[in-house]
Amino acid sequence: MTASLRIIAIALIAWLAGAAADRACAERLIVSVSNHRVTVTSNYVGEELVLFGSVESDGPGQPLRSSYDLVVTVSGPKADMVTRRKERRFGIWANADSRQFLDVPAYLAISSNRPIDQIASPDLRRRQQLGLDNVLLTQRVGTDYADVVSTDPFRRAFIRLRTERGLYREATSAVTFLTPTLFRTGIPLPAEVPIGTYEVDIKLFAQGALAARTQTAFEVVKVGFEQFVATAARHHGLIYGVATAMMALMTGWLASVVFRRD
């Protein structure tokens, strides 16, 4: 056997050994959400869903590893948003500059069982968008469209403002492993939660590497009179505007009659 053939044979054996090791530790995730349809009514004040699941072997007779890490990312409906910076000019606060964020999640919650920087390497965190600092938030910067560094003042202000409203969050101890393979975590939904479809991305890590991944989803919908008003405003804007103006006029007239001084 020539030297080149020996090198090829050694490489093939190493590849087969690595593939066999991967198969020996192959995992899959089984997950579910406590409620796949959240209804918003006039007295809705928020809700917390529960995501629960387990780590299963991907085949019969394949052993599971002794410890895992889990990162759960919940992202709500996407929209274009603007962040403005105010400056004091001539004694008053005025908008000085702005940055438009394109097709970004209106709701974003990232949960893990321990700090994310202890779960994966910086390169893997960037590639898998683990944590608020690594989530892709495309911006319009002049004539360009790009994400920027996590220390960008507009990016930081955007995340801070969404976090203050409870719409963005990162919790590094929110995932609980009940057993080495059973886990649960909460998904808090604030009172002003956006309406739409929410995607839940669950990533399992073992020894700093991505071991398995699965996805699920749930919906937030309005029902009753709130749904009627939202549908009318979205699909019949002119009629909705006229009806709103008439209601305002009638309310003003009624108030003048009730509180009229004779």
Image (tube, grey):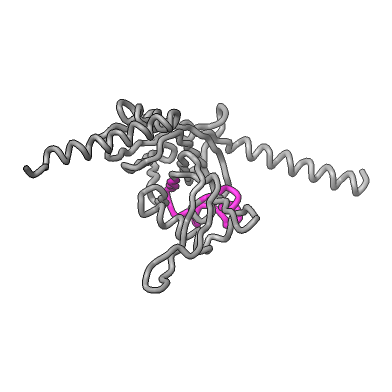
Q: Is residue 33 visible?
A: no
Whether residue 122 appears in magenta in the rendering, the answer is yes
Where does the image place residue 51, in percent across and percent down from the top left? 39, 36
Q: Eyeballing the image, is 127 above or below 59?
A: below
Q: As rendered, which of 20 and 147 lies closer to the eye?
A: 147
Q: Residue 225 is drawn in which quadrant?
A: top left
Which residue is painted at 45% across and 46% down in the image?
108
Q: Is residue 101 visible?
A: yes
Looking at the image, the residue that sits furthest to the right is 2
Q: Residue 87 is drawn in which quadrant?
A: bottom left
Which residue is painted at 36% across and 33% down in the image?
242
Question: Position of 186 compared to 252: left or right?
Answer: right
Where does the image place residue 255, in percent across and percent down from the top left? 17, 40
Looking at the image, the residue that sits furthest to the bottom is 90
Where does the image place residue 244, in percent across and percent down from the top left? 33, 35
Range of residues picked out in magenta: 108-130
Q: As rendered, which of 189 and 43 lies closer to the eye?
A: 43
Question: Position of 179 compared to 253: left or right?
Answer: right
Q: What quarter of the picture does the C terminus occupy? A: top left
Looking at the image, the residue that sits furthest to the left is 262
Q: As rendered, which of 262 and 57 lies closer to the eye?
A: 262
Whether residue 43 appears in magenta in the rendering, the answer is no
Which residue is painted at 58% across and 58% down in the image?
148
